[in-house]
Amino acid sequence: MAARIGVVTFPGSLDDHDALRAVRLSGGEPVPLWHGSDTLDGVDAVILPGGFSYGDYLRCGAISRFAPVMGEVIAAADAGMPVLGICNGFQILCEAHLLPGALIRNDVRTFVCRDQRLRVESADTTWTSDFTAGDEITIVLKNGEGGYVADEETLRRLEGEGQVVFRYLDGNPNGSFHDIAGITNARGNVVGLMPHPEHNVDPLTGPSTDGVPFFTSVLSFLSAKV
């Protein structure tokens, strides 16, 4: 039986259907989850998708962090369930303190939308095990508030403990400290990144299928766990 991967829809989510499709194309069973629910419907992993949840009011992800379903997501993540936050989902993970730091407005003060080259810095997470550290991949990037920031102590810890998972190549698109595009928690089950792997799973929509290993990684992890 295929692993069940839940994708949460918040008011203003934009890429939830793309994430559900990516799960299906990668061999998992996609399960829609609703922001107002108080259950995760027995899923094995959760994806918080991109978009503009609650209109990005207050701060991106600041209201979503208090959605009823997030209480369940936080408890499940603390218990070891794989959780992936993509773009707005990354912002929500930081607001929920499942990941350190914050995302602020791009230093270029414009919305950035482009095919972005990344270097995989860590394959030691539930969402990146099908990569090899040092791999260079191309993933769609589209954000207005994607600059990752953290205090120096946090940055030293992330770098020193291998919690930087992805780094921007060919120029920093949004002013992220240390060119950071994605990070993980210490346990390796929670990953957040600004680029959108769900848009890079089908050769028809190109320019790469470099997003596929995100989803096959978690499926492999869950299969081995069983």
Image (cartoon, helix red, strand yellow):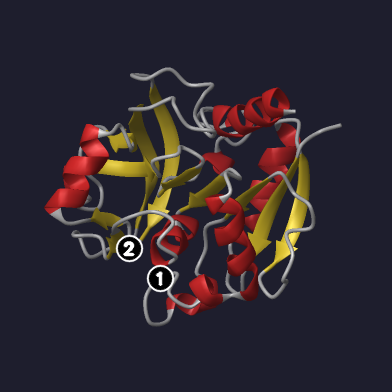
Is residue 129 shown above or below 66?
Answer: above
The dot on residue 145 is: 2
The answer to whether residue 73 is left or right of residue 132 is right
Where residue 8 sits: x, y (%)? 65, 60
- Neighbourhood count class around disc 1 (C-alpha, 10 Å): few under 14, some 14–19, many 20 upward: many
Secondary structure of the residue carrying numbered label 1 = loop
Instruction: State the residue at coordinates (44%, 26%).
Output: 124
**Residue in the picture at 37% in, 20% down:** 133
Q: Find residue 177 and report its horizontal and vertical position in percent.
A: 18, 48
Quarter holding residue 195: top left
Q: Picture quarter containing residue 22? A: top right
Report the mark closest to the observer, 1 or 2.
Answer: 1
Residue most toward the front? 79
Residue type of the residue flagged with mark 2? Glu
Residue ID for mark 1: 60
* Front position in the image: 35 or 115: 35
Image quarter hosting the N terminus: top right
Query: What amino acid is found at the position of numbered circle 1 in the picture?
Result: Cys
Res. 67 image quadrant: bottom right
Q: Are marks 1 and 2 in contact (CB under 8 Å)?
A: yes
For the point 33% across and 37% down, the residue is 163
